[in-house]
Every structure is written in C-alpha cells, then in structure tokens.
Image (cartoon, rainbow, N blue to C red):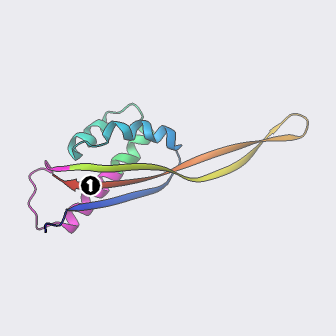
Amino acid sequence: MEEKAIISASLNGIHSSPRKMRLVVNLIRNKKIQKALDLLKYSKKQRVSIFLRKLLLSVLSNWHRKYSDLSLDNNSSLYIKEIRVNQGRTLKRLRPVPQGRGHRIRKKSSKVLVLLEKR
C-alpha cells in the first residue's frame, strides 16, 4: 500500500475577516503551487495575499524538510489539495454614539489551513 505524501501548514489570527480572505483563497484552490504563488504575487488584494503567500512558502518549506529524499524538479507536481478559511477570534470594541450609548464594533480575524499533495 502506497502512502500518500501530504503536508500541512496553518496560520492563525490574521487580522482580516474570513469573507475577505475567502475571495483570494478561491482563486488558488486546487492549483499547482507555483501557479498559486504567481497568482498571489500579482493579486489586487495585497494585504491578504501577502499572508497567503507566506503561508504557501511555509508549507513548501515543510514539504522539503519532510520529503528531502524525493527529487522534485521545480515543484511541478505539488498542488494545493485543500485550503480552508475559518473564523478566528473576534475583538469586541465599543464606539461612542450620541445620548451616552455605545455601538459594538467587531473586528474579526481568520484561521487558514493548507494541505499540499504530490500528484
């Protein structure tokens, strides 16, 4: 029985809402790793794409550390098997409004999980 070569990395507490993060994540889902890095490099959503690019480089580093004996020519056979964005912690703040009241401000954060696999 052949063991599947899968590696993962995660990023917690990104100060961006999960909804904004999913817009960029949907672009790179099920793509080859090099194509995904190129898409993130030239994405218009710069703030989010910087975090995701660092995460992909981290999972690529984890791959090379674990499977250093496997020879890969320019990572051509690696692709993103699964990428998931969940909601992280929410910071709750109060904003003063007239007549002594306060409105809640919820600053959401995200958690991202990436699974990389060899085809």
Q: Which residues are magenta?
A: 55-78
Q: Residue at x 27, y 41 (%)?
A: 36
Please provide percent x and percent y for residue 41: 31, 38
Q: Quadrant of the N terminus?
A: bottom left
Measuring 87% from the left and 33% from the top, which residue is drawn there?
Answer: 98
- Image quadrant assignment for residue 2: bottom left
Q: Position of residue 28 (x, y in %)?
A: 31, 40
Q: Residues within 10 Å of mark 1 (few under 14, many from 20)?
A: many
Judged from this view, the residue extending furthest toward the top is 44
Please identify the residue farthest to the right as the structure is shown.
99
Q: Would you identify the image quadrant in which residue 58 lies?
A: bottom left
Residue 113 as seen in the image, left or right of residue 17: left
Q: Residue 28 in magenta?
A: no
Residue located farthest toward the front when viewing the structure as drawn: 1
Residue 117, given in percent of the width and then of the height, sits at 22, 55
In this rendering, the answer to whether 67 lies above or below 105 is: below
Residue 57 in the magenta stretch? The answer is yes
Q: How many marks?
A: 1
Question: What residue does disc 1 label?
Answer: 116
Near-viewer residue (63 or 115): 115
Relative to 12, 58 lies left or right: left
Q: For the residue marked with disc 1, what is the amino acid?
A: Leu
| Residue 31 placement (x, y as % from top left) | 25, 42
Dot 1 lies on which element? Answer: strand
* In the rendered image, the vertical position of residue 70 relative to residue 75, given as above or below: below
Q: Is residue 73 above or below residue 103?
A: below
